[in-house]
Amino acid sequence: MRVTIKDVAQAANVSVSTVSRVLSNKENFFASKTADHVRKVAADLGYQRNAYAADLASHQSDVLAVVISATKSNFADEIIAGIHDVATKHGNSVMILYAGENNPTLQEKAIKTVIERDVMGVLIVALELGDESLNSLKTSGIPHIFLSTAAKENLGPFIASDDHAIGYEATKYLIEHGHRKIGLVGMDEQSFVGTQRMNGYREAMAEHSLSIDENWLVPGYFTFEDGEAAMQHFGKQPAVTAIIANSDLTAIGVIDQARDYGLEVPAQLSVMSIDGTKLTRIFRPTITSVTQDFFQIGRAGCAALLTGDNEPIQSKFLPIKVVERNSTRQL
Amino acid sequence: MRVTIKDVAQAANVSVSTVSRVLSNKENFFASKTADHVRKVAADLGYQRNAYAADLASHQSDVLAVVISATKSNFADEIIAGIHDVATKHGNSVMILYAGENNPTLQEKAIKTVIERDVMGVLIVALELGDESLNSLKTSGIPHIFLSTAAKENLGPFIASDDHAIGYEATKYLIEHGHRKIGLVGMDEQSFVGTQRMNGYREAMAEHSLSIDENWLVPGYFTFEDGEAAMQHFGKQPAVTAIIANSDLTAIGVIDQARDYGLEVPAQLSVMSIDGTKLTRIFRPTITSVTQDFFQIGRAGCAALLTGDNEPIQSKFLPIKVVERNSTRQL
DNA sequence: CAAGTATACGCAAACGTTTGTGTTATTGTT
DNA sequence: AACAATAACACAAACGTTTGCGTATACTTG
């Protein structure tokens, strides 16, 4: 049997309440002499507080939950690092829960877990929540925020990059470097992210009076394999001079396949990626990217949840930037 | 205020205990008619169980904790996927906690969190725990297991790959392919993993009566940068014909730097990695590796914790295999 | 039909904290 | 010296469950 606060109280010859107040540092409730004594006794006995009991009694937990897509988005780690960075400073614990991307059952299980534990807040990372889960979360009243999923209006507050701007800036960069025929690979037309990026692409093309051949648009997700497949679709003599890929991994898929076709990147084909994670720096050629600041997204999201005031959380976009590397060239 | 079991009981005109038993499916304790009714009322009222209260009363939680190194080991995801695979089937929740690699404070915080929550088990992934943390964990009595950290004797049960064998097999493979001068990059001499792998390397070399130049051994960790740095150490005319890197990322660092020196891989230098994650397949040249089955490590670890019997957990090694790809060649 | 046995349910204690409200000793004020 | 104010602590209720035990009812069995 574990040693409880009661055991400590007995051993220290004080009441349970005094022990509780000392151990949770409620100022002005005890003499420092008593406090020292209690703390010593607790340490001697090897007391470990029971977080469940404490949370139950106080109705407030100090844990933040991160719900995250199971399918490997390789930037999730950076977001999580950002979250931890500020959570640690505030003394909060972080628990991470994986949910499937398009697996409502897993999503609901994850959401159920966080609601049952009445966490103080939940961060949903790179995940478009199903209606059921979303609803549970909303009615639970637990503060939450979407990270890296700028979402449809009524979804809730988010912190993300502006996906429209991402599509726009990538396209603009390539146009300014002389490209006229630009492919777009791996966009999921069902998702908000995908459509936004496509809209940005279309806008940039239109602004420069460039017409779009719908064959240049190859849908997909964020995977390496989607990049390969897309490049296979373009074939050995691609109709485009440049390709924008929906993720770093997808860009690598495109480049690998292009090479297998004997096409040199960037000499014969420019490839640009979205995300700008470390992959773009270790791969050769290094990959020009629209870079998102995932670490800051994590930090900002966590901070928003921890401000403590009761004002509703403000959604916002964090800046993106185009980072030029060696996978693109001036035509 | 959330709706509690008491509210449900009132609305359904039964006792609290009945609601509890119905909702947690204690067979043979209620009539199915009552059960249906209770369940319906609970659903109508939007009842959400309070896991804290439940765990407190029953003294058993259904959550497994995964404590993991913050520094990005890119195979951790596979292990976690394996853990989830079996945890989900058993209906257990999984919470992940990040701890610093060599940051005892963060480690202790993570361990403290899991102990306070009295989780049903903890999986320590790719992390060598500090003495303090290890001690807390042991005295807490919570079942735990080390994954991918074959550890010093008294550390506790583990599931991992045999690091000695890893070093041995990699070296043997290269020797069998005609290499005589083999470098070893990124081994951390302080860690058990590092020394084991080095011992394997030494054994294989000795078995073939090959002597070792200590300059061939370049210590480090598991990072890309360590790979680059190591290759810089070898210089433009490396004294070795092949290099074994401590991780996939490190191998990539080696290859990138070699290329910058104008060395072709594998024509002029063979590079072999340890781990065999997806990186080895998307990078070009694809990287020959000693491949570990991280997914199975995760599965086995989780399963070991969930067997339920009280027998002590058995440590074991999972098989590894050498997978030939394009970064090595026959001399 | 009596006696025994399931079955279905309720009562209330327990889990380990937190916290509002007493209660006592101590100090300060006039 | 009398009284108020404060400091330091104790008491006990509450948090929302689970679960051992008790009990009323219905069902068997000989």
Image (cartoon, coloured by chain):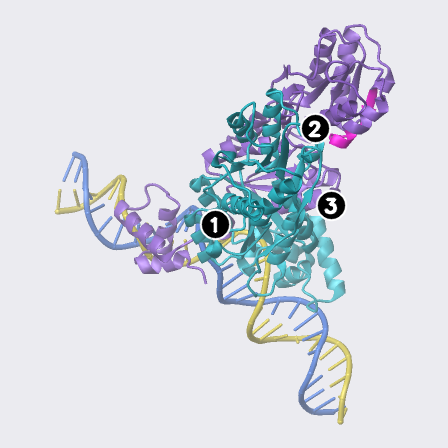
Chain colours: A cyan, B purple, C yellow, D blue
Q: Chain of mark 1?
A: B
The CA distance from mark 1 to mark 3 is 31 Å
Distance from Cα at disc 1 to Cα at disc 2: 54 Å
How far is the residue under mark 2 from the one under mark 3?
A: 38 Å
| Residue B123, magenta (yes or no) | no
Q: Is residue B315 visible?
A: no
* Above or below: residue B287 compared with residue A250: above
Q: Is residue B283 visible?
A: yes
Residue furthest toward the front?
Answer: A209
Q: Is residue A193 above or below residue A261?
A: below
Kindly indicate whether the residues beneath marks 1 and 2 are on one polypeptide chain: no
In the rendered structure, the answer to whether residue A218 lies left or right of residue B108 reads left
- What is the x, y in percent for residue A15? 63, 62
Q: Give the residue drawn at x 45%, y 45%.
A: A108
Give x and y (percent) for residue A266: 67, 30
Q: Residues within 10 Å of mark 2 (few under 14, many from 20)?
A: some
Amino acid beneath label 1: Ala
> Which of the 4 image quadrants contains residue A77?
top right
Where is mark 2, residue-wise? A284
The residue indicated by pointer 3 is: B105
Q: Nearer the viewer, residue A80 or B31?
A: A80
Nearer the camera: disc 1 or disc 3:
3
- Residue B54 tag number: 1
